[in-house]
Image (cartoon, grey):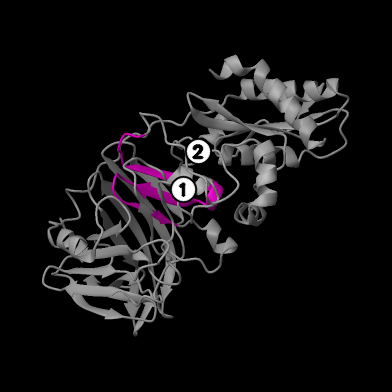
Amino acid sequence: MSKVLLPLALSLALAAPTLALAQAAAPKPHAEFQLPKPDAEGQKPRAVVTLAPYRYDDILWENDRTAHRIYGAALEAAEPPSTSGVDAWGKKVRWPYMDRQLRTGDQHADHGEGLDFYDVGAGRGAGGLGVWHDNKLWTSRNWKRWKVLQSGGDTASFSVDYAPWPVDVDRKVWETRTFTLPLGSNFTRMVSTISSDKPGPLIVGIGISKRKRASGSGTFTKDLAPGRVSFWEPTDPDKGAMAIALMVDPKALVEVRQDFDNYLVLIRVEPGKPFVYYMGAAWDRGLDFHDRAGWEAYVKAQAPDFDPGPAAPAPQPVAAKARIGLDLSIKLARGAIEACRALGQAVSASVVDSDGVPVVVLRSEDSAKAPVAAPLKAATAAAFDAPGSAMEPREAADPAFARLIASQADRYNAHGGSLPLHKDGKVIGGLAVADTRHDTADTCARQALAAYAKDLN
């Protein structure tokens, strides 16, 4: 017999604002591996937004030409002080790759489709903003709330809220921003509304992080009449160079200047009134731009729309994420416990959904241990789409993966005895067994999965 300790209604799991995650590549031990190509359907160009709860709630968005990321509040504790700057990734395929790349735990290496090597640092990265006051840029912490508007088709669009932050000692501001990236463009269109607890105009600074390498400091150019700036970064000899550009409404432009970390475009805005700006990025080892002249010609040819109203997409329904049901979760967990009982082992077992939220945690009545490890192991299998039997040796051999797991010990456990669960080629959850030898736990989990495999199809 087994005891149900934590059944969670599926409706609770559905409350989190998440998107369907693309099937992740199985983790490999070090940087030389190549990401397996997706199937023919997965290789179709599309614009997508993805939440990465397995990596401190990063938000990833990309299309067929460019890829970006912003950071969630969970990162503030893990990597203080963190930053609300915007990240840019190098990309050299037309299909989405960021989620599979990030799940490897080795996203800073090129595994055949691109990599994350842009360093946001303490700056604004690729188009983050702040309020310019008294010769200082006052910036928010990371995003607090998000909402998907469109994903998976011709446009990726989402909105985020930034909690109030101080501007000096006598004013607070807060922001809602919508990000929209269509297919075929290197530019994300942003519509920002900054509110304030006091009246009066604000000077907003939109930034590009400075860079200095052995090859130099890069080339920053500005064309103030149409409100455009561009920065071709100095080349990293191993990873290449990123190009970043900003476009703002020239009627709102105040000046272009620098602080210690950033090139800044300063614009005048009214609190509570939306304004539009564009951020674009490219990688010289990607598919579209290989030199500064080509990039700057592309920036010059753009025809931005600075009207915050008509071009903003209306919210559209997002396809529901496939989820594992409570009945099947109980069957799987009980099956694993009974398989271990036949081997003389009293264990705990857990099934989680694709976000790592426990659907059920079971414990054999003969077990004296609290069922702590099983849900963590199951969540790890779901997050990395890999069995514990593969992740445990990887944790020992791959320092980057080991650091990632250790940094989130309250969420992950990469030990053997866990399996990802799939339906229609997508991860829908994880199953894990704990409180016995890892190889025994793996055997019991696999027996349970084999017994109920037809229920997952």
- Say above or below: 362 vs 67: above
Tag in front: 1 or 2: 1
Q: Which residue is mark 2?
A: 24
Give the distance between the C-alpha atoms of the residues marked 1 and 2, in whole angstroms: 13 Å
Q: Which residue is mark 1?
A: 111
Which range of residues does the magenta coloring cover?
43-70
Which residue is painted at 31% across and 42% down in the image? 94
Where residue 70 sits, quadrant-wise, is bottom left
The quarter of the rendered structure image containing the N terminus is top right
Report the number of discs: 2
Which residue is painted at 77% across and 33% down in the image? 439
CB under 8 Å between discs 1 and 2? no
On the image, the x and y values in percent for residue 307 come to 16, 56
On the image, the x and y values in percent for residue 226 come to 12, 68
Query: What amino acid does circle 2 point to?
Result: Ala
Question: Which one is nearer the viewer's eye here, 441 or 397?
Answer: 397
Question: Which one is nearer the viewer's eye here, 298 or 238?
Answer: 238
On the image, the x and y values in percent for residue 108 come to 48, 56
Classify mark 2: helix, strand or loop.
Answer: loop
Count residues near mark 1 (Cα–Cα under 10 Å), then give few for <14, some for 14-19, many for 20+. some
Q: Which mark is residue 312?
A: none
Query: What amino acid does circle 1 point to?
Result: His
39 part of magenta stretch: no
Where residue 7 sits, quadrant-wise, is top right
For the question of whether residue 413 can be seen, the reply is no
Count residues near mark 2 (Cα–Cα under 10 Å), then give few for <14, some for 14-19, many for 20+. many
